[in-house]
Amino acid sequence: MGWNDIKDRLDEFANLEEDCENFGIRNSDLAKCLQKGGDCQGYLFRCLHCGKLRLWGDFS
């Protein structure tokens, strides 16, 4: 996933800032770094307990 895939769903995340910190990126850098097919690729998950979205990222 890239930024364009999630930018309109930010209110659906449990804690996007925490998710970013967990994979080593600042929330303020997410829009420029998270690119589909780029060096930073995002993976979207839905929490089974609260139903909110969680994001994980992977760097090449």
Image (cartoon, grey):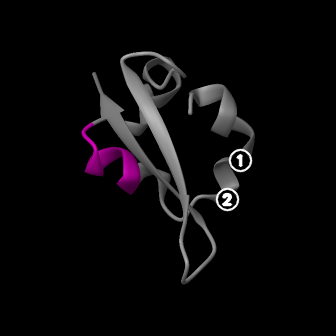
What amino acid does circle 2 point to? Glu
Residue bearing the label numbered 1: 9
Which image quarter holds the N terminus? Answer: top right
- Provide the secondary structure element on which disc 1 rests: helix
Q: Position of residue 27 (x, y in %)?
A: 42, 38
Which residue is rendered at x = 68% and y = 55% of the image? 11
Q: From which residue to which does the magenta span run? A: 18-24
Check the image and report above or below for 13 versus 20.
below
> Residue 58, labelled with which disc?
none
Quarter of the C terminus within the rendering: top left
Residue 5 screen position, x and y as percent = 67, 33
Query: What is the spatial separation of the Cα atoms under label 1 and label 2, in whole angstroms?
Result: 5 Å
> For the residue marked with disc 1, what is the amino acid?
Arg
- Residue 49 or residue 26, whichever sits in front: 49
- Which class describes the residues within 10 Å of circle 2: few (<14), some (14-19), or many (20+)? some
Which image quadrant for residue 50? bottom right
Residue at mark 2: 12
Q: Residue at x 61, y 68 (%)?
A: 52
The magenta stretch spans residue 44: no
Residue that appears at 33% across and 35% down: 58
Relative to 6, is 31 above or below? Answer: above
Tag 1–tag 2 contact (CB < 8 Å): yes
Up the image or down, 7 lies above or below 14; here it is above
Magenta stretch: helix, strand or loop mostly: helix
